[in-house]
Amino acid sequence: MATREPGRLLVCATPIGNLGDVTLRVLDALGTADVIAAEDTRVTRKLLARYEISTPLERCDEHTIAREAPRLVERMRSGESVAFVSDAGTPGVSDPGARLIAAALAAGVAVDALPGASALLAALVASGLPMERFYFGGFLPRKSGDRRRLLSQLSSLPATLVFFESPRRTAGSLRALADALPGRQAALARELTKMHEEVVRGEIEEVAANIGARESLKGECVLLVGPPEAGTTRPQPSDDAVRARIEALVAEGASRSTAVRHVAAELDLPRSDVYDIAHGCHS
């Protein structure tokens, strides 16, 4: 008896807005797979209807991935091909596809990456910011302290910084970027490839003010901030500023040693220097 060929995972990039941006190779994969696992079946059904594809469709999002990944891997190990599509763009980038890819590879299942649309790259190209080096940070942390620490760590990186953001949080995130990275060139891209596509460019303070003045914002957003100018160095906080931050944390209930450790990480300073400042030993 002939054995069935091993299955595989087909990671399919889909349009980020304009349905005409799908590749012929992805359409073939979606049409011939045994099943399509989709992050958002409502969005994927529109694409399948446009191209008259009737492959069975199953939900596989962040709420179901823990349960669905092992089951889909077993189907692939039995010889089936599974096509995975995210909400839009290239799967695995800030979506549950990364977990499915890792599970398939861990089980020895072949993974084929079918390239196509990417909001990250489309926004980077449209921004006009330097593209030879860039850092993609996914979604910025929700908590202000975590966000501040991350941006402090990235402030001296000689690369364009790129983040995804929801429209509801975009204004606040832009203000945080302006506070952490003042004076830099920046851009906000939204509704890419759609009718109301918009790219707002300028200094980060200008972009933040532009978006902050609006009553509402629609469409998923990409935030981009250019690298520091060559030869610039990150300004060092004064001893008074460091001491004030320590005292604020202590007032919130942190022990002094915890506050020292936290401030050292937040400001990217040697812990010994922060300790000396906290205890009045720094000159």
Image (spheres, rainbow, N blue to C red):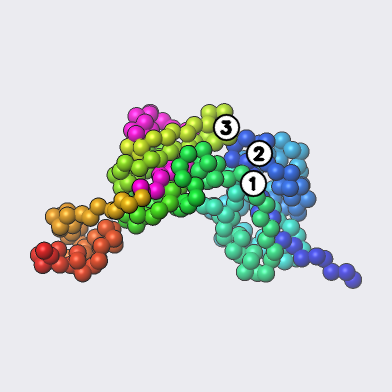
Left of 98 or right of it: where is 155? left
> Which segment did they paint magenta?
206-229
Q: At label 2, which amino acid type do we have?
A: Asp
Instruction: Give residue 29's position: percent from left, percent from top.
Output: 74, 50
Looking at the image, is mark 3 or mark 1 earlier in the sequence?
1
As drawn, the residue found furthest toward the front would be 231
Residue contact at pointers 1 and 2, CB within 8 angstroms: yes
> Measuring 66% from the left and 39% from the top, which residue is drawn there?
21
Quarter where residue 256 is shown: bottom left
- Disc 3 designates what residue? 194
Quadrant where the N terminus is found in the figure: bottom right
Left of 265 or right of it: where is 41? right
Q: Is mark 2 on a helix, strand or loop?
A: helix
Whether residue 143 is visible, yes or no, is no
Left of 224 or right of it: where is 58? right
Whether residue 72 is visible, yes or no, is yes
Instruction: Give residue 196's position: percent from left, percent from top.
Output: 53, 28
> Measuring 61% from the left and 60% from the top, which residue is drawn there?
101
As drawn, the residue found furthest toward the right would be 1
Instruction: Give residue 122's position: percent from left, percent from top.
Output: 55, 41
Left of 227 or right of it: where is 260? left
Q: What element carries label 1?
A: loop
Disc 3 to disc 2, how far (Cα)? 11 Å
- Disc 2 designates what residue? 21
- Disc 1 designates what residue? 116
Closest to the observer, 159 or 177:
159
Residue 250 lies in magenta, yes or no? no
Residue contact at pointers 3 and 2, CB within 8 angstroms: no
